[in-house]
Image (cartoon, rainbow, N blue to C red):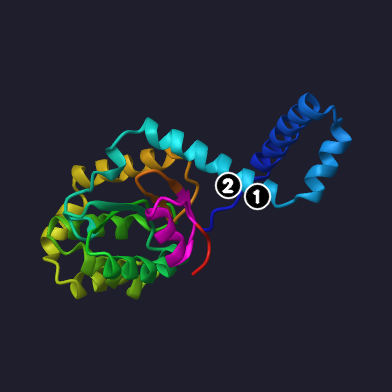
Amino acid sequence: MKSTLPTTFATALMALVFGFLGAALWSYSGLADNRTRTFLLDNPDMLPQMAQAYQQQEAGKRLASIGNDVYAPFEGVILGNPQGGTVLVEFTDYNCPYCEASLADVDRLVADNPDLKVVVREWPIFEGSDVAARMALAAGMQGKYEAFHAAMFENGPVTPESVERAARAAGLDLDRARTDAASDAVTVELARNATLAQSLGFGGTPAWVTSDAAFEGAVGFEGLKSALEGSGPQTGG
């Protein structure tokens, strides 16, 4: 699911921009609202820049409010280096085409950075995705999350049959996996992920968290790399 800027947010942001700049320009230059409007029309690149800055600021506040919980992985549900010092958190859904499209970007990040730990948070928001998310967490409990994660995207969309194919491809003990998938531990983890996503203001998948940023969308390899480097997510491949 792509991240979009809701109309209500855009309207509020425009009011904020015009209000702030209007007040500032009036205070410092004696300019009235019509000149503020002209200034903004002459400098339209300011609006998306301010929108991005505002979103990053609000995301930073939300991230600070939830502490370190978002970085704590469920047992075995990690890609890359489990002991890595650079951490990327991904909220994902196996029925999300943008999550599937981002798989190669994450794989590339892991290949390029041996210190990268990717904490995956299963967040089944699409219809029917819950069964795959549960089996994915069960795979983590067997130390085979990475294999199931890749196989599930290869075998999607999610159906009971495709989940079983992915589980077999990953080499899971199916009897144990079915039991684990229905366990309280898995149920609690899925509820925790939904709560974290809500607390961070996420509306869709994929969604990402770094040490200092939280954002949504299939932003591509360079976008994720920029976010990990602390320069904020930049769109593009």
Is 126 left, or right, of 54 in this rendering?
left
Asked where in the image residue 32 lies, by quadrant, the reply is top right
Is 183 left, or right, of 1 in this rendering?
left
Q: Looking at the rendered structure, which numbered label has been put on residue 34?
A: none
Instruction: Name the amino acid type tagged 2.
Output: Gln
Q: Residue 196 location in percent, x, y?
A: 37, 40
User: Could you tell me if residue 139 is visible in this image?
Assistant: yes
Q: Looking at the rendered structure, which numbered label has been put on residue 52?
A: 2
| Residues marked 1 and 2 touching at CB (< 8 Å) | yes
Query: What residue span does the magenta drawing correspond to?
Result: 215-233
- In the structure shown, which secondary structural element does the residue marked by tag 1 occupy? helix
| Of the pair 132 and 85, the residue shown nearer to us | 85
Q: Residue 61 location in percent, x, y?
A: 45, 33
**Residue under label 1:** 48
Asked where in the image residue 63 lies, by quadrant, the reply is top left
Instruction: Name the amino acid type tagged 1.
Output: Pro
The answer to if 229 sits in the magenta stretch is yes
The answer to if 195 sits in the magenta stretch is no
Q: Residue 152 location in percent, x, y?
A: 31, 69
- Determine the residue positioned at 28% across, 72% down: 151
- Determine the residue positioned at 78% across, 31% down: 25
- Determine the residue positioned at 45% across, 52% down: 231
Q: Residues within 10 Å of mark 2 (few under 14, many from 20)?
A: some
